[in-house]
Image (spheres, rainbow, N blue to C red):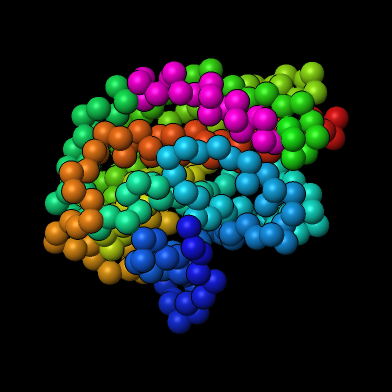
Amino acid sequence: MKRTLTLMLSIFFAGSVYAEVFSVGGKELAIPSPEGFSPVTQQMDAVYRMSLQMVDPKNDQLAYYISDSDIPTAIAGELPSLDRNCVLKVNRQLKNTIVSSKDFAELKSIIKRQNKEIFESLKAQIPGLMKGTSEGISKEFDVDLALEISQMIPLDPHYEADNALAYSMYINYGVSLDGTKEELIVSATATIMNVSGKVLFLYCYGPKGELEWTRSASKSWAEDVMDSNTASPARSSGGGGIDWNALFVGAITGALAALVYAVVSIFMKTRKG
């Protein structure tokens, strides 16, 4: 996915100073950073290397955002706690498709009807997803790491706009690092958006007790993204018949794959110990 480095300094709105431009299937989208967060760059060596180990068979990552308070540690080449972080993705098979508001409404309807059922159907894919990520981190950082997800608790959608729908989840995962085992429950909010005809996934993560923060941060971010781009078109193009169930599966897969970032807090504490 080509990432345009142009910064649109002329775009000003509440909570952000500029929006970065991403080229998604030939369409340029202006995406502001979540308030209080900045995108990870190669200058943040350890965090950047960690981000490259994420295994996601269905989506392309456009950007990974960490708290501004974590940037000095990241620039120093160390891994911050990363208790809060955000991720921007696009579905690989849909990135060249223009999606109308009408078709996006169909997707929202499917999510509201089948949210929990689709989560259940994904259980068989989780071990392979975690295995690939574990192996990548182990090799990159010369450690013996194993990740597993023992439980996912999906919650009903809680926020809806014409071109956005958000739902949250709790994810219980275990980490085994060089013989030391830890468990952690992460709260996450995923927002599926139709931005100028391009479907994007926005993810916000926090500790177990910060579900409401993930929701409010995701909502503010989504509103800023919408304010920075044109409305979705009246007609879809370039995709033929769209499998919305598969797209929603991709959105959930993307949320689980990005858990590699939440793992960093345990990774750091264990290594320091």
Q: Position of residue 101 (x, y in %)?
A: 18, 55
Q: Where is residue 162 in the image (x, y as percent from the top left)?
A: 21, 53
Quadrant that contains the C terminus: top right
Quarter of the rendering containing residue 23: bottom left
In the image, what residue occupies the spot 58% across and 59% down?
A: 39
Side of 192 where 235 appears, left or right: left
Which of 249/187 is in front?
249
Q: Position of residue 211 (x, y in %)?
A: 47, 37
Main SS of the magenta segment?
helix
Q: Against 196, is 148 above or below?
A: above
The magenta stretch is 119-137
In the image, what residue occupies the spot 53% across and 21% down?
A: 127
Q: Against 22, is 179 above or below?
A: above
Q: Against 190, is 89 above or below?
A: below
Q: Against 158, is 200 above or below?
A: below
In the image, what residue occupies the spot 38% across and 39% down?
A: 251
